[in-house]
Amino acid sequence: MVSRERGKTRYVGMILMLPGVGVSSPGGFMIWTAYICEVNFMENDFVRWLDGCCSGIASLEAEGGARRVAGDVEAFRDVMHEKAMLLAGMAREGEPHIVALPERMREKARLRLARFTASAENALALDSVFYMSALLFPDEYRDGEPNDLELFRDEIRNQLQAEA
């Protein structure tokens, strides 16, 4: 796998070695280079994926709030369980998207996703609706402020833009 960066675009390619075709190499194999993707740092796949997760969480939070206000405790519990399940799968679901990040940012992203996952798994193991509803929200949170997942997404986006 090779990677070249030019401006805001990183070209990622794979060197394919096939016998009998292309440019000869010392080992008797022929070398072909195929560029398999272009990644624009301003519209990074990992950030797009995080945007989708943030939107999904926001929708669940809005639905949960409406259920709570309506006094539908069971529906609120179901929505918060769904939120926790979404967060519990983040480390696994995010892994294919992490490769869109520059290598130096990948481990930090993995660790943050693992923290979101661990917190959600704890909330599910305890079967605590309060814990599920509090996921992503620090103690000092105020309505209208970004939650921890949105802050993480914005941090990644800002780092990518600063380096572009």
Image (tube, grey):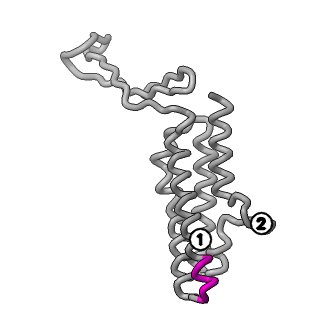
Toward the left, the furthest residue is 20
For residue 81, side relative to residue 153 (left or right): left
Residue 153 is labelled as none
The residue under label 1 is: 62
71 over 16 or under it: above or below? below
Magenta region's main secondary structure?
helix
| 3D distance between C-alphas at marks 1 and 2 | 15 Å
- Looking at the image, which is closer to me, 125 or 135? 135
Name which residue type carries label 1. Ala
Q: Is residue 39 magenta?
A: no
Quarter of the C terminus within the rendering: top right
* Residue at screen point 50% across, 27% down: 10
Residue 95 locus on image (x, y percent): 49, 49
Vertical relation: 133 (above or below) 148: below
Element type where label 1 sits in the image: helix
Percent of width and height locating residue 78: 51, 80
Pointer 2: what residue? 142
First in sequence: mark 1 vs mark 2: 1
Where, by quadrant of the figure, is residue 74 drawn? bottom right
Identify which residue, 61 or 28, lies in the foreground: 61
Quarter of the image for residue 63 reads bottom right
The quadrant in which residue 59 appears is bottom right
The amino acid on which the numbered mark 2 sits, given as a three-letter code, is Arg
What's the magenta region?
65-71
Q: Residue at coordinates 61% horizontally, 89% vertically from top-left? A: 71
Residue 106: give x, y in percent of width and height. 58, 42
Q: Observer-nearest residue: 137 or 23? A: 137
Q: Residue at the location (58% across, 64% down)?
A: 58
From the viewer's perspective, tell me whether residue 63 is left or right of residue 93.
right
Residue 29 horizontal side relative to residue 126, left or right? left
